[in-house]
Amino acid sequence: MTTDPSMDMRRIQISLPATGEEECDSVRESILSGWVTQGPKVAAFEKAFAEMHGVPHALAVTSCTTGLHLALAGLGIGPGDEVIVPAFTWIATANVVLYCGATPVFVDVDPATNNIDVEDVARKLTDRTRAVIPVHLFGLCADMDGLREVVPSGVFILEDAACAAGASYKGTSAGALGDVAAFSFHPRKSITTGEGGMITTRDADLADRMEKMRNHGAEISEEQRHHGPSPWRLPDFNLLGYNYRMTDLQGAIGLVQLGKLEQFIAERQAGAEAYCEAFVDLPWLRMPVMPTEGRHAWQAFVTWVDPEQAPMSRNEMMSKLNERGVATRPGTHAVHELGYYRERYGLKPQDFPNACACAANTMAIPLHNRMDDSDYAHVIEAIRSLS
């Protein structure tokens, strides 16, 4: 008796965190220790993350968004400054610039990679440009060599590495490619702490400044104060800071997850290769770029639906796949088309045509570490049936 593939009623999510008993045990250990706010587990997580990404300094924070904000604040970005950001990205990349009172200057993206267009960066540089934020979108590192060629000395490069834990570019890890970087541990990322983020940098002075600023600007940490010989001592505050500290519960989860990152990326790489092989003969579905000099972190597998050749619109395609139990998502936003930025800056879709095309035509399909061979086979069959 044969089984009709259309009757397979499984539900394959776009992403699921791969967590289990090890994470539970680690959190239990923290709870029983009595130290649940930022403490020894966070410190151990920071040390391990820094070592893995080839940098001397890593600071855990509450999210990638707060990490990006803290990095800009630590760099002294403020009113009157311009910060270049790609128009195709999650909205937080632009929002953090406004948090500092600076002005986001949008640039277009390369539709082949979804990453920042270096030539457009060169066109948008002014004497007010203080920083550029290249996004390693979906886990593929931006063209950092090209960016270095056009960005003048004195303009900071802040990597938005939200999707890029474990990624690399020409032998250098994401997080070590710019002046400072921020990563995300949201559940849609390769490793998760629920919410949470990490900042990395080679700059010791910047690391020291950000470490104080994430703890309200305190000159000494809570851990130093509690373990010190002077219980009456309160910290001095010489900087305007924030409460961006990660909890030890999250740090405990992060340590376990980080130990699985190599395995997670290898599994995602295998899934990505399976997709590329399965769809090689579909002219209307373009596969994501696989780097030849570096490693893709595969936070997401984002395809391009060619509107000129596809059998139906991308949105119709996504609806039909949803009916088959296959979750999909657009890649991300064209930020200049979102209401707040459109109204505040008078932006039009045609201002950044490639970002608009990416928003309209990209389609992320399931890729995560809880998928098995039958899940991949189901996604492949469902997509091929659209032709």
Image (tube, rainbow, N blue to C red):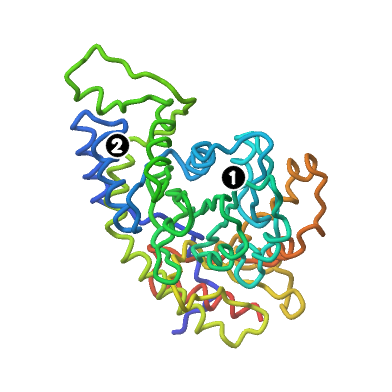
Q: Residue at the location (76% across, 59% down)?
A: 352
Q: Amino acid at mark 1?
A: Ala
**Would you place residue 219 above or below residue 265 in this image?**
above
Residue nearest the viewer, comparing 137 with 144: 144
User: Residue placed farthest to the front in the image?
Assistant: 153
Q: Residue at the location (57% across, 54% down)?
A: 153
Residue nearest the viewer, comparing 87 with 80: 80
At label 1, counting other C-alpha atoms closer than 10 Å, the crowd grade (few under 14, some 14-19, many 20 or more) is: some
**Would you place residue 41 above or below residue 222 in this image?**
below
Q: Quadrant of the N terminus?
A: bottom left
Residue nearest the viewer, comparing 3 with 14: 14
Report, in whole angstroms, how far the alpha carbon at label 1 lies from the one at label 2.
Answer: 25 Å
Instruction: Residue 339: name its quadrant.
Output: top right
The residue under label 2 is 248
Residue 139 placement (x, y as % from top left): 49, 63
Under tag 1, what secondary structure? helix
| Residue 204 appears in the picture as rendered | yes
Residue 20 placement (x, y as % from top left): 29, 52
Q: Earlier in the sequence, mark 1 or mark 2?
A: 1
Q: Residue at the location (47% across, 61% down)?
A: 299
Residue 320 placement (x, y as % from top left): 65, 67
User: Residue placed farthest to the bottom in the image?
Assistant: 281
Residue 10 placement (x, y as % from top left): 47, 65
Q: Amino acid at mark 2?
A: Asp
Instruction: Please state the total of marks drawn on the protein image.
Output: 2
Q: Are marks 1 and 2 in contact (CB under 8 Å)?
A: no
The residue under label 1 is 92
